[in-house]
Amino acid sequence: MAELKEETANDETLQQLKQQMVQGWPDRKHEIPQNLATYWNIRHELSEAEGLIFKDHQLVIPTAMRNNMLNLIHESHLGIEKCKARARAILFWPGMSKDIYEKVSKCATCATYRRRNQKEPMIAHPIPERPWQKLGTDLCEYKGKNYLVVVDYYSKFIEAALLPNKTAGTVIRHFKSIFARHGIPEELVSDNMPFNSKEFDEFAKEWRFKQTTSSPTYAQSNGMSEKAVQTVKRILKKADDPYFGLMEYRNTPVTGMTYSPSQLLMSRTTRTKIPISKELLLPAVPINAQQQLEQRQNQQKQNYDKSTKPLPPLEIGENIHLRQDSIWVPATVSGLAPAPRSYIVTTSDGQQYRRNRRDLLKTNIPPSTIIEQTEDVGEEQPTIIPQPPDLDLQNPPNQGRPMRTTALPIKYRDYVMK
């Protein structure tokens, strides 16, 4: 308190304020000195005792001690609102809330360990015009075994295949088998590895379908595939025979619809072990399927958006923080990716990444080094000698170790996301 009394006595503005309080306040604001104008609205709350000025029971802090008070308030790194609440309970000076905001928003420690951004409103993939036009795919692991999961955006029909390994060659061979049954789609939406390899890119060109990948670390942008993966894992976990479980899923009406994936894809219900009349096995084209799909998607978006909030867009050259391994690291926005809410960012060590807006945090803290903007975003990926495919979900052949022959740079290409 001794230091506070001393600094209050040395603060010219607070001494003028004390004198004004003794003299009494005029009837009009323009009649007081300009530097006291910020105290006008609280003039009736001010008092003086033992050389200190109070706003009710809050100490009025002199200018020379405000920075020290900010350091003490934020010493525990509680965040902007908590720091404001703590300060408002015991201290006061004009513009205190703004000063606290500036202090906390520029804190490198808080920026590093801040919680993830809130969810943004859903950007739903357009509903395809017909079955098997647009597919989603992902790899998943269950009990040490790897599986390829493919789902149709229109019918929600799922294909699953056990993989002896995750090389591009093996994955491609299984895709050829699936495409031989149902046809080649126009578009395949996937995560990155191994779908962004040169070998898979050549496969897409040869088989004439468009391949798009989601933003790394943001699985929601490939949400259809993620949901299909969870369905396959539940079947593998609960079903005695995963083939029968998968067959029953395909014959069960899609949530919110009257048609099953099999009906939407093949216009028929397939025969299973469960008794069924011959009439229900006859082919029948679904009626109003597109309308039902749109209503279902609109309801899903409405439910999802209840707990979301849009994030402000970022500008090229803007200093931001990038979420990596549950912490935030300094980076700079170096480009815009073609997909919605997707950016190219560069970290202080010169590495470039493509990330969704939710993994990027606006900040007032500059990166530790100046970052040059570049045109290409590449990463080294090994080219693997392909191994024979396996179509058995339960009994894969012995897995051999793939041989790496060379490393090729992979160019950044177009992406689509939710």
Image (cartoon, rainbow, N blue to C red):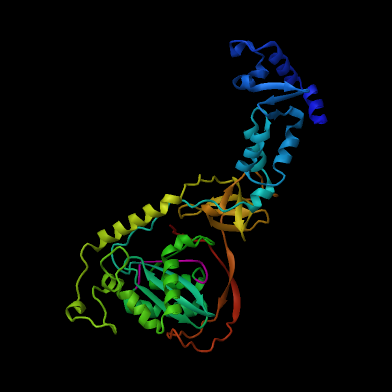
The number of numbered badges drawn on the structure is 0
Residue 321, percent from left and from top: 61, 51
Residue 215, percent from left and from top: 51, 60
Q: Locate residue 101: give its quadrant.
A: top right
- Predominant SS of the magenta segment: loop
Range drawn in magenta: 184-194
389 to the left or right of 157: right
Whether 340 is drawn above or below 45: the answer is below
Taking depth in this image into account, of 21 and 116 the one nearest to the observer is 21
Taking depth in this image into account, of 371 and 55 the one nearest to the observer is 55
Please give the name of the residue rendered at 63% of the width and 45% of the height, measured from the top-left corner.
79
Q: Locate residue 211: give its quadrant.
A: bottom left
92 to the left or right of 140: right
Residue 361, percent from left and from top: 58, 49
**Is residue 370 in view from this perspective?**
no
> Is 136 a magenta residue?
no
Please give the name of the residue rendered at 71% of the width and 13% of the height, measured from the top-left corner.
22
The C terminus sits in image quarter: bottom left
Q: Residue furthest left?
A: 279
Taking depth in this image into account, of 180 and 230 the one nearest to the observer is 230
**Is residue 354 in view from this perspective?**
yes
Whether 383 is drawn above or below 15: the answer is below
Residue 310, percent from left and from top: 47, 47
The N terminus sits in image quarter: top right
Whether 116 is drawn above or below 404: the answer is above
> Is 187 a magenta residue?
yes
